[in-house]
Amino acid sequence: MFAKAELTRLQQQKELLVLQCDARRLLLAAEWRKLKSPERWLTEAGDLALRHPMWTALLTAASGALAVRTLRKPGLILGGIGQLGKVASLALSAWRLLGRR
């Protein structure tokens, strides 16, 4: 008698675990769809720009200057990549300087 009651309890526990697994799988699939959506990425980028307006302005200006320089001399794309490294170094220095304040 005890074994039958124990088996019934274990079977019910198994069914509960299977239902929980299915529910979590559905939640994970929904989160994955939301994460893949371009709207979410645009919203995140907009929120990030609103939270850090100085960095946004700095990166925008640097990107614009690099783009203009590259378009003026189209053969210097590799030079533009070198310039990007210099801009990244400058941005890192500015980040450290602002981080100290």
Image: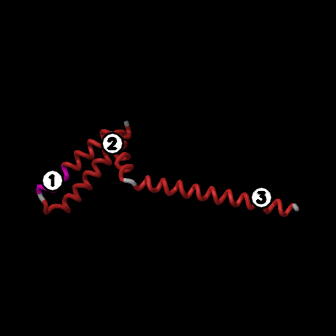
Pointers 2 and 1 in contact (C-beta within 8 Å): no
Q: Earlier in the sequence, mark 3 or mark 1?
A: 3
* Count of picture labels: 3
Question: How would you classify the magenta stretch by its main secondary structure?
Answer: helix
Q: Is residue 67 magenta?
A: yes
Whether residue 22 is situated above or below residue 47 in the rendered picture: below
42 inside magenta stretch? no
Residue 9 has which mark?
3
- Where is residue 19 drawn, in percent x and y? 63, 57
The amino acid type, in three-letter code, at marker 1 is: Arg
Q: Which residue is mark 1?
A: 69
Who's the residue at 12% across and 58% down the image?
73
Q: Element under label 2?
A: helix
Name the residue nearer the viewer: 53 or 27. 27
> Of label 2 and label 3, which has the lower sequence position?
3
Write down the residue under mark 2.
49
Q: Secondary structure at mark 3?
A: helix
For marks 2 and 1, give the CA distance.
25 Å
- Between the residue at mark 3 and the residue at mark 1, the CA separation in whole angstroms equals 73 Å
Residue positioned 14% across, 56% down in the render? 71
Q: Amino acid at mark 3?
A: Arg
Which residue is more in the foreground, 31 or 16? 16
Please state, as top left, top right, bottom left or bottom right, where the C terminus lies in the image.
top left
Q: Which residues are magenta?
A: 65-72
Q: Estimate the x, y position of residue 51 in percent, counting from the top left.
A: 36, 39
Secondary element type, mark 1: helix
Q: Amino acid at mark 2?
A: Ala
